[in-house]
Each structure stands twice: as C-alpha cells, then as structure tokens.
Amino acid sequence: MTLFQISTIAFVFLSLAFFSYNFSKILKTILMGKARNRFGDIFKRAVVFLEQVAGHKKLLRQPGAGLLHFVIFWGFVILTLGTVEWMFYGFTGGISWDRYLPEFIYGPYSFSQDLFNSLVFVAIVYAFYRRIVLKPKRMADNSAKSKADAYLILSLIGGLVLTNLVTHAMKIHHSPETTFASYQPVASFIASFFSEGSFSDPAVYFFWWAHLFIVFFFLNFLPFSKHLHVIVAAPNVWFSKTEPRGSLTTPDLTDEKVTAFGATQTTDFAWKNLLDAYACTECGRCNEFCPTAATGKALKPKTLMIEMRAAISERGRVLQKKTALNEAEQAIVAQEMVPAVFSDQFIWDCTTCGACVEACTVMIDHVDSIVEMRRALVLNKGSNPEEATSAFRNWETSSNPWGFSEQSRQDWLVEKGVPLFDASQHEYLYYIGCAGSFDDRAKKVVESTAKVLNAAGIKFGVLGKEEKCNGETARRLGNEYLAQQMMTANKDVLDQKGAKKILTSCPHCFNSLKNEYPDIGGNYDVKHHSELIQDLLARGALQPKTKMATDVTFHDSCYIGRYNQIYDAPRDILSAVGENKPIEMPRSKEKGFCCGAGGGRMWLEEKTGSRINHNRAEEIIETKASTVAVSCPFCMTMVTDGLKAKGREDIQVKDLAELVAESL
Amino acid sequence: MKKVLIIAEQKKGSLKKASLELLTAAKNDEVHAIIFGSQAKAAADELASKGVKEVFWIKDAKFDHYHPEAFASACEEVIKTLKPDYVIGTASSQGKDLVPKLAARFDGPLASDCVELSIDHAKGKHPFFSGKALADVAFEASTISFATLRPNSLAAGALTGAGKVTETSSNFDFASSPIQYQKSTEATSDRPDLTEAGVIVSGGRSLKTKDNFKILFDLADTLGAAVGASRAAVDEGLAGHDMQVGQTGKTVNPSLYLAFGISGAIQHLAGMRTSKVIVAVNKDPNAPLFQKANYGIVGDLFVLAPLITEECKKQLGK
C-alpha cells in the first residue's frame, strides 16, 4: 500500500469520524423531542418528496433563485458520484472507474461531471452576484454571521467545482489521446490553455488533494452552520405533515399522569419541530407574506426558526454533558422558551395564517411550534393576553366569544322560519357558527346563503340553541381544554342529530369540522358555502338573472385558501355573477394576505406595529375595485374596519353568498 | 324588628353613599353600625343623626386603611357583644372581602352582591352570569345572617330618631399579622371608573379628533359620568385604551349608557349590552346600535351633545 493510499484512507476516515461525532450530537438533540408519528403514508411522502426535493416545486415559484438552487442541488447529487470515484482513486492508488465501466456508461458519466461542474460554477457566480448586487430583500436582515456563513459556503462550492475541473484538465493535458477528453468539453477547454510540457506530480496532487480537502471541510463545517440544511432539509420534507394542513394535533387530556402540556422547554417540542429548526437555512421566504413581519411586529417566522435552533442546540449540548454543570449551564437546563427565548408578544402575534408554512421550501411548520408554545402558556401557567381571558370566559359560560346568552343563539334565524335540522328531511345541516348566530353583519350573510340554498332547492336545517362554538379559535389561542370541551359537546350534538353533510359559512368552523373533528371521532362531509355554490352554479341549479357591473376583487380567507386549497370556487362564483372576472390583488391565493383576525387575534388588541387590516385595505384600494368579496365573517369585520380607517367606506365589502343572492 | 349591624365605609372622612343605601335595606329595623378610621367622626355622626342607634367607631389610626384580618377581628368583637340578627355591608372591594370572612367565622348564611335587599322580608336579589340572570334569595332562620349590597342598587335612606357614637378600640395585634400595610395610591382622575360608573358617555370614530372628545367630557362632568370610547376611536388615537369599551376593552354595566357616533359593531355590544338604558346618537339611521338602544336620536352629535349638556345643566341646576 502506497503512502498516497494510506494518507487518503486516513484522511477520509478521520473526516467521517469527526463529522459523525458532531452530527450525532445534533441527532441526539433532535431525538430528545417528543414522539410524533411521521412514518406512515409512505406514498404521500414520496409524492411530496419528489415534488419538493427532486422537482423544487416551491423553490421554482421564484424562478431566478429557484433555478440557481435547482442547478446547485442536482449538481451536488450528480457530483457526489464523482466524489465517490475520487475517493476510490485515492484508496486504490490511482484507479479510475473507466477500468471497469464500458464507454457508453463512463463517457456520459464523465460528461455529467464536466457539465455540472461548469453549471454549478456559473450558478455560484450568479449567487455571488445576487447577494452582492441584487441584494434580495428577504435576506437583508440576516445576521453578519449568517451572511459570512453563506459566503463561505458559496466559496467552498466554487472551490469544489474549480479544483475538480482543473484536476480533470491536467489529466487531459497529460494524456490528450484519452477517449474521455471528448466527453469533457469544459475540462478540455481549460486544458487548451496549459502550455507545453507536463505538470509536476506535486502540482497535480495539490489540486487533487485540494478538492478532497474542500469536500470534507465542507462536510465538517455543516454541523456548525445554517447550511446543515444540505443534510436535514430532505428528511424534513419527507417527514412533513401528511394530515390535512389545517389540523392541529389533539393531545390526550384525559391521562391524569400528564400534568404539563405544549412546549415549555426545547425538549417539549415534538422531534419534528426540532428538525424543522435545523432545516431552516434563513432564506426568508416565510417573512415575505407574513402579516406580522409586514407590519413591523415582533414575530417573524424566520426569527422564530433561528432562535429556536439556537436555543435547541445550546440546551441540547448542555443536556448531553456528562460532567457536572456550572451555574450558567444549570440556568440553560431550566430555561423556558417564553420568556427566555421569545417574548409573550412574539408568540401571541401570530394569526396562524399559514403564509410562512406555505412559503417554506423545506416544509417547516411554524404554526405548529407557535401553538405548542401557546398551549404551554395557557394550560400550564394560565398566561395569556388579558383580552383572551374574557373571550375564554365567554366561551366557557355562553359558548360564544362575545358572551351573548346561549339561549338566544340563532333565535333570529328560527324566528324567520328556518327549520331545526331533521336528518329525515334535510340534506344539509347548516352549521351557522357564532358570528352568524349573533353578529348583525354576519347574519345578513347567513340570510343570503339561506336564500341561495332555497333557490337551488337544497333542503337544510340548523341546530339553533344546541349549536356550540366549534372550538377552533380557543384551540389556536392555546386553550386546548376549552377547545376539546366545545368540540366534544358539538360532536355529540351533531352525531345525535345524525348529521352527515354539513354546510358552513365560516372558514374557521369549516376547517375545524372538516379537518380536526375526525381526530375526536367526528366524521362528516363538510362544505363551505363557496364550494356548494360553485357546484350549484356549475350544475345549473342556480341561474343568475342579473350580473354585477361593478369591478370586484376577492380577499382570500386563509382557512379556505391556504389551509384547504380552495382558490377557484370563489373566483368561479364571482365570474358567474359578474360581468367581469374578479381583479386579482398582488397578494392572492397561496400568497393571500391575512386580514389579521386568525389564530384568535380577532379577540386580542393589535397594539404593536402598523395594523394588518390597514395594510390589506391599502392593497384593496389599489385595485380600484368598488366591491371586495370575502368568504369569512372575521375577514368581513377586519376588511370593513380597515377600509373605514382609510376613509374608503364607499368600497363595499360583501360575502360571496350575498353577491350570488343579489344576482338571483 | 330585627337587630342589624351595618358595616359603614367612609372616604376622606365623608360617609359613602352606598352605606346609606344599607339603611334603606334595613329601614324598619334596629340598626347599629361600625365604622373605621381616625377621620371618621363626621361620618359616624351622620349615621347617628340618621337614626342609627349606636355607631361603633374604631378610632385607632391603624384602621385608616383596610386590613383584612384587623377589620374582621374588630367586627367580630362587636358582633359578639351586640349579637345582631343581620350583618350587612356594601359589595365594595372592602365589603366583598370582609363580609364573607365574617360569615365564615360565625358560620352564617351569606347573600353576596345583592341588587335588591330587604331585611324586613328576609330576601334579596342576586345577579349571576354577569347579570344575565337574577336569583331570588331568601334568608332561612339562622342565629346570624350576612349580606352585601351592590352600590347604586337602592336609594340612600335615613331612619327616624337619633343615636349615639361610641368610640371603641380593638385589641388586634398588628405587629404579628402576616399582612402589613405598605401604601395606597389614588387614581388621579376624579371621574368615576368606567367599570363602576352609573352613567357612561361614550364616543366613536365620528368625533374625528381627540379635542372633539371635550364635548363628551363636558356632558360627563355635568352628569358625574365616566367617558368611554369605541375600539375604532381608540385605534384612531382619539382616546386612550383605558377608555375602550367592548370585547377587547372594558365590560361596563351602567344604568345609563349614552353612545355618540358609535355604530354598534358586535365587538362594542359585547362590552356594554347589559347597560340598563342605552341612548344612541348617530347620523346614520341604519346604525345597528339603534336596534339595541332604548332611545335613539338621528342627528349630528356635534350639535346634539352640547344641547344635551346644556339641558342637563338646567335640569340639575348646575
């Protein structure tokens, strides 16, 4: 065995050992998280993996950055083959795979290496250009350390492909008659610049070693860098949520041995929440459509992940220590996420709109982590914003957030002659929700929906006094006790009445009944009125007589849109009842901008930053539409208030059902 | 005729009106009173002049500030010698703390936070679920019974005849008590607190500027009312958040709620719908608040508010 072989083997072995040591510490930290089953649904996982990892579906939404990443990603995959050959060459003391492989395999393989070395090099140059000249806004707020980290990684990748190309070029220069030169046009091109005569052995070995050294320096740098995402992003996508996007976990509250809930400390999160934090590479796509980041509030989803990772790593390191802990380390062990890592404001800012989750290319679930922290605050400490307490109390005593008498729920509707649900006579149970039961503005939407249903000959009934709040908002405010109490009570009533098909006008009722009730054993066919009306129009069961002549724009509800991917139904409805198609706002559909009321924020004061609904109102005003259509009672309130505040009360805010009812 | 001990309260030497309401609750009975504080002479005399048979005045300056254990101990001593049939107090923050403590010590029944109370008939009314329902409560025969009466529930009363004031002391050992008085700070505003006010004047976004709220303050000062605001007005910076009435602000329960330029969105109703009488003033005849109001005026608040102030001044002789 030559010295060359021995040194290669020793180098590779030591590098891998050092990497394994550091990476295993991170793995151990991640596995300190609580159990969560993310191992089933192999087929669904494979599809998401192919789409997002192999296909870069979300990344390519931003074509420039997306393509750049696509090239570097696939370059990595393909060039890794070359790296294996590189090591093989060292281990064997100079044998390349061409000795074993026929030309029709080794030739194209050589070409792939040459091609991707070059493409990656171009991508790296473009990446530098983007960072230095174009300066993408979403990364502008990254820390100096994070920026230095990025430049180092880019330089390393550039170094990798350059040393690779130069080494190949030297080989071609030494033996230009080799068959494979023609498969390596770029390396050959570089070789054409070399002057006559051969390189000394040290020169060749210098580049060969430089390449191998960069490969393993890169690998060993990853555990200390945000670029650990190179390793954990793909698994993070694989283990992402396959349950409906709008469903939160349902902790078992009946087990009396469990006395704490949610995430008080880093190790209270599920392992997947911890993996999320390591998968983040601080690209900042999450901040772009985040309503709180856009209005200058404490919460920014990127910061959430960066700070979580810092806290998780630090506490994980201390928890793994086998020696006695000093005072500072003991403080870290005792550290609670709130207020040590995040302020209360930070955690309560979130509207759970899901814009960050939608934007994240590595499928991080920010909302899940936020709700876990809220649960810990509310269930273990009784700590929540003051205003939430009165909403909680009202839900407890009256099953609606305003505290109106439970006995008067839907009185107005029953007085108008809407029947109570009877499974033998009615196809649909129209689940009205708290807003439709008590809020005068939302009542008008319910009336319009009823009118539309009657026009289409749909038989439906309501629950009247027996309906309860569905628990959605209490749940997103972290009050899981209260939420499960209301959910169970509601489910019992629904089951007892024999409800099969449920219609809702409120996206929050819709999402909860459809996606969260199955967890407590409530399985129904749930439709939002936008879906049903779209269907009725398409089937011709509804015939609009008049068409709206005015321009209308549509404000997507987060829980209809992003959480349930219903984007077309509202637009189809508006096209059917209007002379023109709706005007799209810049932030619509997947990129829809929250009204500010989600996640229980409807019941809290918005005291910091500018107002989310004002921000949205400005965008609505810019469309010059004279009507804005909504599909949610809370959007209705927020958008109306936002427009009022901007002095544009002339812009009408209408629910889809109202516009349809007007056209009949 | 029953023997009743009322726990009277004074502020800066003058008797609280709520204590006189207790006399109405016990108008046909033999009433005794206990009052605390070195400044309470005038208040004690007033009670005696209004027909309280004997006023026990705990004059010790240590009783100038409420101390849960000391007050309970002093009351206990008086009750033990007086042996009243009833002990009644105001459902103030002091009364809500003190009277239940006494009821426990004497193992007697307690009717708390009554809005109606008659010792003669041995019954009262007690609201629950934030005033959504009223319970009729009756006292069963007992050696001693206790009750607290919510302020502004009955008219101030007076009994016939005159009584005497007896200075007494208590042997409570302040030094060994785990509760030590530190200091008290007073709210700066002399307008009543929103959550306790009997009358509230409230304004919405239509007031347009912070200065315009002055017309509501004028009216409030005429009526001795507190001033509230809608969320929209607070958001616009026309009023402070401490003035906000509604879902995310204060929940109020006045006898009279005057709303100027407030449309009556559900968030606002959630905070003031239990007001006894609601008056809405709004330019927009379709404002939802008109549906909930007992009285409504469709018109310009900038014209109407000063007119109402002027008329109130005339009527009240101010």
Image (cartoon, coloured by chain):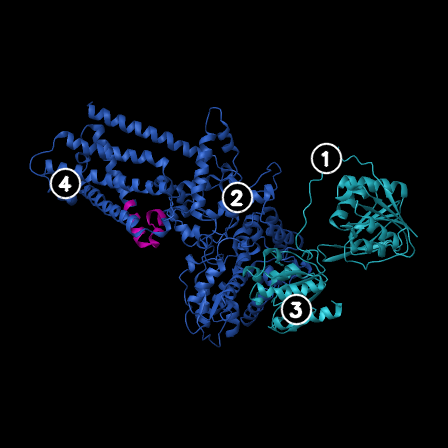
Chain colours: A blue, B cyan
In the picture provided, is A603 more to the left or to the right than B34? left
| Distance Cα–Cα, label 3 vs label 1 | 51 Å
Q: Earlier in the sequence, mark 3 or mark 1?
A: 1
Taking the magenta stretch, the answer to whether it contains residue A56 is: yes
The numbered mark 2 sits on a residue in which chain? A
Q: Are the residues tagged 2 and 1 within 8 Å (C-beta)?
A: no
Q: CA distance from mark 4 to mark 3?
A: 90 Å
Q: Which residues are magenta?
A: A50-72
Q: Which mark is residue B280?
A: 3
Under mark 4, the amino acid is Phe
Q: Residues within 10 Å of mark 1 (few under 14, many from 20)?
A: few
Neighbour class for label 4 at 10 Å: few (<14), some, many (≥20)?
some
SS at mark 2? helix
Q: Which residue is mark 1?
A: B178
> Label 1 amino acid?
Pro
Alpha-carbon span between mark 1 and mark 4: 93 Å
Q: Find disc 4 in the rendering and name its residue.
A: A180
Q: What is the C-alpha distance between the residues marked 2 and 3?
A: 43 Å
- The quarter in which the N terminus of chain A is drawn is top left
Side (left or right) of B273 relative to A651: right
